[in-house]
Image (spheres, rainbow, N blue to C red):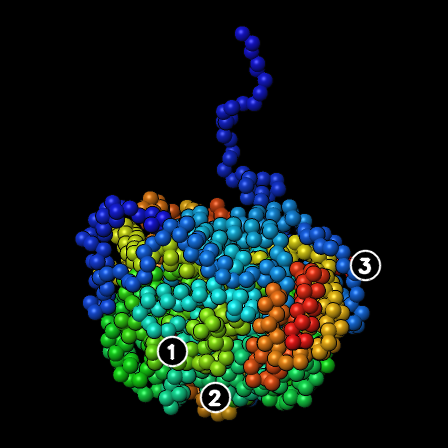
């Protein structure tokens, strides 16, 4: 026989001293240590090839910039490396469960991305003549029809750019309606203590004072307290339903009735619409205005913090006050009414068209039947998590079902030395993004878990198993696993005090670094 | 349904674990009157192919800007975006992540935001920038309200050269917050009238350069006048590529600079999503709206980034917040930052020079057309002209020639009495053939 | 030194009152990252918002413990807000006031009463 003894070993050698091993470069295998663009790039480097233009700005005289801007450039391969390396330091829905309560982190279908990039939508100018934008106007019109049908509301203002912008739009409609009716003295808004921070912020923004409504022990609006606080100076109530405790407001119809009886409008924060889409119409509950976060319920991607989209559905009473623009049906097709409508204008153009295309593709994909199933599976998944985790953790409202999110308090951690924050940070080491913490404010050490309908049972079980295992070691006294967590993430816990005390909000060259020379070639 | 992983048997077993007999048990808190048994009157679910057909058919009804000669600007500009920009922003880790509230597993997004803030500060010539706003128009309104907080005055003066939609948004939002908004009359060189409108009650003056008529202005004198009266100067820019050629707002004395960042990295998208740029002098940072990303260290001393100064924001400050903004334009900011990394200093300057060169070529072509009066004395890449009749009718007529011949000013402000003003923008995507087609169409239609 | 139920302290230095937040308050807030001190020359009534103190996670209003006009604000706090944690009842003072009504000072709790009050929280 021929016998070759050269080659590499094909079994791992005995592992020695692997724990705490540190590389020489700061990299951790696939995870690269990546400097800032400003430390990498060159002042004369570029990743584009532009034609040589004869530079002549003589007509602009001293309006021309003399000093360098300070923008380093990268070639294309370096650009790809830089941002791909950075991307690998992010958690993402496509990687694992992202159970942020109140955020509805569901799967983002890629068909939607493909549709939004069709040149007919992406390469369409907002001020292109209406005759050249009939398809875009038709899409806005169809999306509006779906939103109105799903909410049971007669009108929708499409232009708000995100949820909080939608809240502002809704409150401005309410203010305009009151002023038109000679009720401009109504300047008080009632908001439950469990509300999203944007609610009181928005109310204050339009010059309203904010008063809190108490909550009952079962996590709902205290109807008696609401009635006691309603009066002739109340402009609106702002109630989230399902609420931020993940519960449906059982008395919602009565809440709307008493608000209306006192001349106030009912603004509903629609952040949690995912729990009821296709099953319950807010219009049947007495809502006057509600924003819909297309980036929550209708799957447009969160993109690391936006863009969102927040169309606002409106009741008959508020519809006349909606802001420009509107899609109008005429003899020559569709057009936009861009002036002289409602209380004014929320944004320069017509809203988040790119998000409209994505949301519409999502709705058409699901259809009436699929959307109903979305709500049912979202609620089922949350109740499943609540049932499984209740074995070790304490649900804030144990009685009755929750809606699309399960809320726990921290009483089960009492005596362990582990806080909600510690527990959440330990989840990172187990491969999961933490849940929403310390919100709503009405529950001590709150942990708000929203799985959404796009999680498989296997993934839900993996998540529950991990949390139950963590709960067990927390109760067994392994405090260090939590206090120092995360250990395995790209970075350990960050010093937020330092960041806030000595804010460093932009890269600045070290004093020794030579400033870039002005470009000579121009 | 392809997006729903649960099977019928999963659902049945899970109901068993919960101890519910049917899904309806989980909706018992919904009042009976609001429970709907059947499906809504909407079509049933559809496969990818069917959805693509419907949306493809709608898209085909539109004429994309790239389909032929195209001259619309007025706040949104068609620029070429390198292929790698769109590739990177579609990576799962950027596209499908949330606001970086857990910094240990969001350093990718946070470092990008830090780079974005640094780039925006550099472009605008100011010290600090935030992590983006919805768009240029809402950024303008936010800047005006910030000036109120800084100066404790309630009047804002808006130049007549400010984009009318920006003025309308500011009027709507800042007025709602209790401010008095004084909008000066629209005029080509409207900046000349601004100084006279500043008084002791003025919180800020808002000036756009290049303005809505394309006019480039040195606002230094306005800055001096504003500062002498204790007011802030807010400079608005709707065409971010112009930063590559023109003096920055900071150099000219601006206290706050806001801009529409769409031109860099982002498609036209029929008006959104776009990305608002917001920068200010360092001493004003605590009054800034929106998210801010800051540098710090982790428990092992390694450099890292976090959202910071968040006590300004709605989720902590609630009714005392500097703004109600929450979601911003993260992914559009990423596209902006990638495109600007590809351009670099040299590339952006070159791109700006090309844009300006195209506008000079446009001007040369327009000068010889009988009946056309060029109104913009100093421009970057946009020129306003006066036409013999209605500019809107002219645009309508030129469509028949296959030319999308700009934005009639009356579309932005029907009551301004400027029905004969037409705004024409060019970019690096405009070819000499496009300009020739526009010239021919203008000549023919004006002659009719 | 006298104290309020909102955890501000006042100490008279001649005819000027020095005002700050108590050690208890500083500890409850955690790491102080920013202090907005009142404007010199501005007059406040007792109980009015006159300063803001921020930790990373919270912003708290500070109320004027007595009525008066601000004659000096503590400049150290803008660069070193951590002084509030290090020495809340000394170098971490917020402002000096010219009292409008000396009787207001006398009506506040003394240290013993304040400590008793803390026991009830």
| Nearer to me, A493 or C109 | A493
User: Which is more foreground, mark 3 or mark 2?
Assistant: 3
Q: Residue B195, position in %: x, y?
A: 68, 86
Mark sitting earlier along the chain (3/1):
1
Chain identity of mark 1: A
Chain identity of mark 3: A
Residue at the top extreme, as displayed: A1
Q: Residue C75, position in %: x, y?
A: 61, 76
Question: Do the residues under discs 3 and 2 have CB atoms within 8 angstroms?
Answer: no
| Nearer to me, B364 or A359 | B364
Label 2: few (<14), some or many (≥20) within 10 Å? some
Q: Which residue is mark 3?
A: A520
Where is residue A26, by image quadrant?
top right
Q: Residue A94, position in %: x, y?
A: 44, 49
Label 3: few (<14), some or many (≥20) within 10 Å? few
Residue shown at the point (42%, 63%) measured from the top left: A294
| Secondary structure found at label 3 | loop
| Nearer to me, A408 or B8 | B8
Would residue B439 appear left or right of A120 to someone viewing this image? right
> Same chain for marks 3 and 2?
no
Above-or-below relation of B110 to B272: above
> What's the CA distance linking mark 3 and mark 2?
62 Å
> What's the CA distance linking mark 3 and mark 1?
59 Å
Q: Which residue is mark 1?
A: A319
């Amino acid at each position: 026989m021929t016998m070759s003894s050269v080659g590499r070993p094909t079994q791992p050698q005995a592992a020695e001293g692997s724990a705490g091993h540190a590389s020489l470069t700061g990299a951790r295998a696939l995870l690269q240590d990546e400097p800032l663009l400003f430390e990498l790039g060159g002042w004369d480097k570029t990743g584009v090839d532009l034609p040589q233009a004869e530079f002549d700005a003589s007509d602009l005289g001293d309006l021309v910039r003399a000093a360098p801007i300070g923008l380093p450039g990268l070639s294309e391969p370096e650009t790809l490396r830089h941002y791909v390396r950075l991307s690998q330091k992010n958690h993402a829905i496509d990687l694992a469960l992202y159970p942020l309560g109140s955020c509805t982190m569901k799967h983002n279908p890629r068909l939607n991305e493909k549709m939004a990039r069709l040149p007919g939508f992406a390469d369409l100018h907002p001020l292109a003549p209406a005759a050249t934008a009939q398809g875009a106007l038709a899409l806005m019109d169809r999306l509006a029809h779906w939103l109105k049908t799903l909410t049971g509301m007669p009108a929708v203002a499409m232009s708000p750019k995100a949820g909080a912008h939608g809240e502002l739009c809704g409150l401005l409609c309410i203010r305009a309606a009151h002023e038109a009716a000679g009720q401009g003295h109504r300047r008080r808004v009632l908001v439950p203590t469990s509300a999203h921070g944007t609610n009181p912020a928005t109310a204050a923004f339009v010059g309203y004072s904010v008063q809190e409504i108490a909550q009952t022990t079962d996590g709902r609006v205290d109807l008696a307290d609401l009635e006691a606080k309603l009066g002739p100076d109340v402009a609106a109530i702002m109630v989230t339903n399902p609420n931020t405790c993940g519960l449906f407001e059982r008395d919602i119809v009565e809440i709307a009735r008493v608000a209306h009886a006192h001349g106030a409008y009912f603004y509903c924060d629609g952040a949690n619409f995912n729990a009821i889409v296709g099953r319950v119409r807010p219009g049947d509950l007495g809502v006057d205005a509600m924003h819909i976060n297309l980036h929550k319920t209708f799957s447009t991607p969160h993109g690391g913090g936006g863009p969102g989209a927040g169309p606002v559905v409106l009741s008959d009473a508020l519809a006349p006050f909606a802001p420009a623009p509107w899609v109008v049906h005429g003899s020559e097709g569709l057009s936009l009414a861009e002036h002289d409508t409602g209380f004014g204008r929320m944004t320069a153009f017509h809203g988040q068209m790119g998000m409209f295309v994505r949301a519409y593709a999502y709705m058409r994909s699901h259809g009436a039947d699929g959307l109903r199933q979305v709500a049912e599976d979202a609620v089922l998944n949350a109740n499943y998590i609540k049932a499984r985790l209740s074995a070790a953790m304490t649900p804030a409202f144990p009685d009755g079902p929750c809606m699309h999110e399960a809320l726990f308090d921290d009483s089960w951690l009492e005596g362990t030395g582990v806080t909600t924050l510690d527990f959440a940070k330990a989840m990172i080491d187990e491969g999961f993004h933490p849940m929403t913490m310390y919100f709503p404010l009405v529950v001590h050490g709150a942990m708000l878990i929203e799985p959404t309908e796009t999680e498989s049972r296997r993934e839900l079980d993996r998540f529950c198993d991990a949390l139950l295992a963590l709960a067990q070691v927390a109760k067994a006294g392994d405090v260090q696993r939590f206090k120092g967590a995360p250990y395995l993430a790209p970075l350990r816990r960050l010093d937020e005090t330092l960041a806030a005390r000595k804010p460093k909000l932009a890269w600045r060259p070290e004093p020794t670094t030579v400033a870039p020379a002005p470009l000579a070639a121009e | 349904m392809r997006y729903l992983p649960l099977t019928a048997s999963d659902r049945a077993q899970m109901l068993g674990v919960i101890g519910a007999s049917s899904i309806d048990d989980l909706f018992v808190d919904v009042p009976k009157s609001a429970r709907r048994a059947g499906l809504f009157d909407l079509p049933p679910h559809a496969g990818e192919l069917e959805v693509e057909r419907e949306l493809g058919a709608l898209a085909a009804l539109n004429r994309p800007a790239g389909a032929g000669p195209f001259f619309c600007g007025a706040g949104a500009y068609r620029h070429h975006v390198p292929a790698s920009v769109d590739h990177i922003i579609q990576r799962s880790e950027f596209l499908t992540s949330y606001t970086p509230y857990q910094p240990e597993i969001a350093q990718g997004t946070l470092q990008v935001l830090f780079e974005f803030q640094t780039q925006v500060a550099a472009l605008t010539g100011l010290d600090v920038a935030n992590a983006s706003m919805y768009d240029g128009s809402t950024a303008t309104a936010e800047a005006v309200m910030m000036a109120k907080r800084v100066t404790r005055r309630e009047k804002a003066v808006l130049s007549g050269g400010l984009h009318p939609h920006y003025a309308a948004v500011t009027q709507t939002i800042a007025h709602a917050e209790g401010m008095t908004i004084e909008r000066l009359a629209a005029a080509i060189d409207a900046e000349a009238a601004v100084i006279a409108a500043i008084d002791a009650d003025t919180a800020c003056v808002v000036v756009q350069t290049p303005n809505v008529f394309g006019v480039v202005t040195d606002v230094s004198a306005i800055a001096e006048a504003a500062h002498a009266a204790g007011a802030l100067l807010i400079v608005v820019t709707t065409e971010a590529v112009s930063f590559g050629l023109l003096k920055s707002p900071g150099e000219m004395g601006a206290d706050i600079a806001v801009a529409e960042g769409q031109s860099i990295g982002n498609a036209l998208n029929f008006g959104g999503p776009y990305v608002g740029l917001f920068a200010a002098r360092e001493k004003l940072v605590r009054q800034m709206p929106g998210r801010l990303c800051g540098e710090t260290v982790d428990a092992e001393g390694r450099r890292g980034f976090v959202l910071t100064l968040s006590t300004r924001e709605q989720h902590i400050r609630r009714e005392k917040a500097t703004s109600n903004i929450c979601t911003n334009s993260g992914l559009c900011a990423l596209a902006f930052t990638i495109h600007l990394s590809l351009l670099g200093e040299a590339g952006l300057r070159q791109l700006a020079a090309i844009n300006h060169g195209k506008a000079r070529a446009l001007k040369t072509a327009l000068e010889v057309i009988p009946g056309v009066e060029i109104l913009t004395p100093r421009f970057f890449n946009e020129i306003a002209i006066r036409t013999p009749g209605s500019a809107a009718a002219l645009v309508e007529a030129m469509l028949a020639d296959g030319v999308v011949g700009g934005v009639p000013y009356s579309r932005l402000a029907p009551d301004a009495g400027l029905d004969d003003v037409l705004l024409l923008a060019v970019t690096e995507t405009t070819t000499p053939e496009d300009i020739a087609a526009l010239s021919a169409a203008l000549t023919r239609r004006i002659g009719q | 030194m006298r104290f309020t139920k909102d955890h501000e302290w006042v100490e008279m230095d001649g005819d000027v009152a020095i005002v700050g937040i108590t050690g208890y308050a500083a500890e409850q807030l955690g790491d102080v990252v920013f202090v907005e001190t009142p404007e010199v020359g501005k007059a406040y009534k007792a109980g009015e918002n006159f300063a803001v103190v921020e930790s990373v996670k919270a912003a708290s209003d500070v109320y004027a413990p007595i009525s008066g006009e601000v004659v000096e604000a503590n400049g150290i706090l803008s660069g070193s807000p951590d002084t509030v944690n290090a020495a809340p009842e000394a170098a971490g003072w917020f402002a000096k006031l010219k009292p409008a009504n000396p009787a207001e000072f006398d009506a506040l709790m003394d240290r013993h009463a304040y400590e008793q009050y803390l026991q009830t929280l």
